[in-house]
Amino acid sequence: MGVRSGMMYTAGIVSVGMSFLSWILSKEYENDIARADRWGLFVGEWAPTFFAMGVALRIEEARQEMMMSGMGGQGYEEMGGTDERMARRLGGRATSRV
Protein backbone atom coordinates (compact mmCIF):
# COMPACT_ATOMS: atom_id res chain seq x y z
CA MET A 1 0.00 0.00 0.00
CA GLY A 2 3.03 2.26 0.09
CA VAL A 3 2.95 2.96 3.82
CA ARG A 4 6.46 2.77 5.27
CA SER A 5 7.62 2.43 8.86
CA GLY A 6 9.12 5.92 8.80
CA MET A 7 5.71 7.38 8.06
CA MET A 8 4.25 5.69 11.14
CA TYR A 9 7.13 6.89 13.34
CA THR A 10 6.60 10.41 12.04
CA ALA A 11 2.86 10.16 12.73
CA GLY A 12 3.64 9.04 16.29
CA ILE A 13 5.94 11.98 16.91
CA VAL A 14 3.43 14.40 15.38
CA SER A 15 0.65 12.99 17.56
CA VAL A 16 2.74 13.62 20.69
CA GLY A 17 3.12 17.25 19.60
CA MET A 18 -0.56 17.47 18.73
CA SER A 19 -1.43 16.07 22.16
CA PHE A 20 0.53 18.82 23.87
CA LEU A 21 -0.85 21.47 21.52
CA SER A 22 -4.46 20.33 21.97
CA TRP A 23 -4.00 20.33 25.74
CA ILE A 24 -2.62 23.88 25.69
CA LEU A 25 -5.30 25.20 23.31
CA SER A 26 -8.11 23.42 25.10
CA LYS A 27 -6.85 24.77 28.41
CA GLU A 28 -6.98 28.29 26.98
CA TYR A 29 -10.44 28.04 25.40
CA GLU A 30 -12.27 25.68 27.78
CA ASN A 31 -13.44 26.69 31.23
CA ASP A 32 -13.08 23.14 32.52
CA ILE A 33 -9.49 21.96 33.17
CA ALA A 34 -10.60 18.30 33.24
CA ARG A 35 -11.96 18.59 29.72
CA ALA A 36 -8.67 20.10 28.53
CA ASP A 37 -6.83 17.15 30.06
CA ARG A 38 -9.15 14.70 28.30
CA TRP A 39 -8.49 16.33 24.90
CA GLY A 40 -4.75 16.02 25.42
CA LEU A 41 -5.04 12.40 26.54
CA PHE A 42 -7.35 11.50 23.65
CA VAL A 43 -4.86 12.66 21.04
CA GLY A 44 -1.93 11.30 23.07
CA GLU A 45 -3.35 7.79 22.88
CA TRP A 46 -2.69 7.73 19.14
CA ALA A 47 1.10 7.83 19.54
CA PRO A 48 1.62 4.27 20.88
CA THR A 49 -0.57 2.90 18.09
CA PHE A 50 1.45 4.69 15.42
CA PHE A 51 4.74 3.56 16.99
CA ALA A 52 3.54 -0.07 17.20
CA MET A 53 2.46 0.03 13.57
CA GLY A 54 5.86 1.49 12.67
CA VAL A 55 7.63 -1.38 14.43
CA ALA A 56 5.43 -3.96 12.71
CA LEU A 57 6.08 -2.39 9.32
CA ARG A 58 9.84 -2.23 10.01
CA ILE A 59 9.87 -5.95 10.84
CA GLU A 60 8.03 -6.66 7.58
CA GLU A 61 10.43 -4.42 5.64
CA ALA A 62 13.43 -6.23 7.16
CA ARG A 63 11.90 -9.61 6.31
CA GLN A 64 11.36 -8.55 2.71
CA GLU A 65 14.93 -7.19 2.48
CA MET A 66 16.28 -10.47 3.85
CA MET A 67 14.27 -12.48 1.33
CA MET A 68 15.44 -10.33 -1.58
CA SER A 69 19.12 -10.12 -0.63
CA GLY A 70 21.38 -12.93 -1.73
CA MET A 71 18.76 -14.83 -3.69
CA GLY A 72 20.24 -14.07 -7.11
CA GLY A 73 16.88 -13.73 -8.82
CA GLN A 74 15.50 -17.00 -7.45
CA GLY A 75 12.11 -17.13 -5.80
CA TYR A 76 11.55 -17.69 -2.11
CA GLU A 77 10.28 -21.24 -2.64
CA GLU A 78 13.26 -22.15 -4.84
CA MET A 79 15.66 -21.15 -2.07
CA GLY A 80 13.97 -23.48 0.38
CA GLY A 81 12.43 -20.74 2.47
CA THR A 82 13.99 -18.82 5.32
CA ASP A 83 12.82 -21.25 8.02
CA GLU A 84 14.60 -24.23 6.45
CA ARG A 85 17.83 -22.30 5.86
CA MET A 86 17.83 -21.02 9.42
CA ALA A 87 17.17 -24.51 10.78
CA ARG A 88 20.11 -25.91 8.77
CA ARG A 89 22.37 -23.22 10.19
CA LEU A 90 21.27 -24.13 13.71
CA GLY A 91 21.75 -27.85 13.04
CA GLY A 92 18.11 -28.86 13.27
CA ARG A 93 15.05 -29.27 11.10
CA ALA A 94 12.39 -26.76 10.27
CA THR A 95 8.91 -27.58 11.43
CA SER A 96 6.16 -27.40 8.88
CA ARG A 97 3.51 -24.76 9.37
CA VAL A 98 -0.11 -25.72 9.07
Image (cartoon, rainbow, N blue to C red):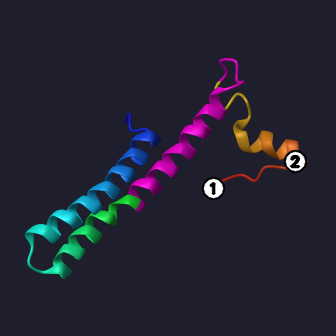
Pointer 1: residues within 10 angstroms few (<14), some, or many (20+)? Answer: few
Q: Position of residue 20 (x, y in %)?
A: 28, 62
Mark 2 secondary-structure assignment: helix
On whether residue 54 falls in the magenta region, the answer is yes
Query: Alpha-carbon distance for marks 2 and 1?
Result: 22 Å
Q: Earlier in the sequence, mark 2 or mark 1?
A: 2
The residue located at (46%, 49%) in the rendering is: 54
Residue type at tag 2: Leu
Q: Decide if residue 37 is on the left or right side of residue 97.
A: left
Mark 1 secondary-structure assignment: loop
Decide which of 47, 1 is in the foreground and name it. Answer: 47
- Total tally of numbered discs in the picture: 2
Give the quarter of the image for residue 65. Answer: top right
The answer to whether any part of residue 52 appears in the image is yes
Pointer 2: residues within 10 angstroms few (<14), some, or many (20+)? Answer: few
- Identify the residue at the far front of this view: 28
The residue located at (57%, 46%) in the rendering is: 59
Residue 90's label in the rendered image is 2
Residue type at tag 1: Val
Q: Quadrant of the N terminus?
A: top left
Q: Position of residue 19 (x, y in %)?
A: 28, 62
Q: Quadrant of the C terminus?
A: bottom right
Q: Which residues are magenta?
A: 48-74
Q: Position of residue 47 (x, y in %)?
A: 38, 59
On whether residue 8 falls in the magenta region, the answer is no
- Identify the residue at the far right of this view: 91
The answer to whether any part of residue 76 appears in the image is no
The residue located at (60%, 39%) in the rendering is: 62
Q: Decide if residue 75 is on the left or right side of residue 61.
A: right
Residue 7's label in the rendered image is none
Residue that carries the numbered disc 1 in the rendered image: 98
